Image (spheres, grey):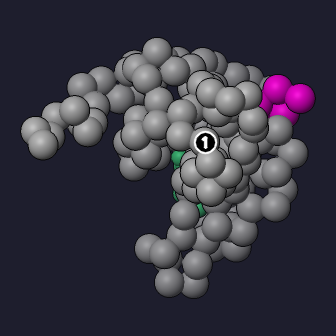
Amino acid sequence: MDLVETARAVRGNAHAPYSGFKVGAALRAASGRVYAGVNVENAAYPEGTCAEAGAIAAMVAGGDTRIAAIAVIADCPDPVPPCGGCRQKIAEFADGATPVTMATVAGASVTRRLDELLPGAFVASHMPR
Ligand code: THU
C-alpha cells in the first residue's frame, strides 16, 4: 500500500471531536518500514497533536530515525499542507529533498520537497557544540 493509502486507512481513527477535521499521516523510514499517525485532539485544546507528530513518534518508538517520504491526507478542498510546526518536526528526521505528499480524500494530491515547504530550516547543524 502506498503512503497516501496508508494515511487514508488510518485517518478514520483520528480523534478530532473539536475541529471535526480528521487527518491521517504515513511515512516510510529509511529502513523501509512504514509508520502511521492521526491527529489526537484534547478538551484542553492546546494539548492536541497533529497526525504527522503521531507518525513521527511511532517511527522513533520503532527504532527508526530517518524519514524517506511522508504523506498527509484530509477531507479538504485542496491537498492538506503540514502545519508549520509539523514541517519543523519532519525536518528533524528528513533531508531537504525528502518528498512530502499532500492529499485530499477526494483523490487530489501534490508532492513537494521538504525544502520547498520549509526553506532555510533551522536544524541541529546550526548549533555549535
Ligand atoms: N492537523 C494535523 O493533524 N496536521 C496538520 O499538519 C494540520 C492540522 C490537525 C490538528 C487539529 O487536530 C486539526 O487538524 C485542525 O487544525
State the residue lying farthest toward the left.
128
How many numbered dots are placed on residues in this image?
Answer: 1
Disc 1 crowd rating (10 Å Cα; few below 14, some 14-19, many 20+) is: many
Residue position for label 1: 64
Q: Is residue 53 visible?
A: yes
Where residue 26 appears, as percent x and y from the top left, is: 70, 40
Where residue 55 appears, as percent x and y from the top left, is: 64, 49
Quadrant of the rendered image holding ligand 1: bottom right
Q: Which residue range is magenta in the image?
A: 1-5
Q: Residue at x 60, y 42 (%)?
A: 64
Mark 1, secondary structure of its residue: loop
Find residue 124 and report its image quarter.
top left
Q: Is residue 71 visible?
A: no
Q: Residue at x 74, y 23 (%)?
A: 108
State the quadrant of the N terminus. top right
State the residue lying farthest toward the bottom.
43
Position of 90 relative to 20 (above/below): above
Residue 93 lies in the magenta-colored region: no
Position of 41 relative to 37 (above/below): below
Position of 107 relative to 34 (above/below): above
Left or right of 2 in this view: 125: left
Position of 31 relative to 115 (above/below): below
Magenta region, main secondary structure? helix
Residue 4 lies in the magenta-colored region: yes
> Which of the pair 72/78 is nearer the observer?
72
State the quadrant of the C terminus. top left
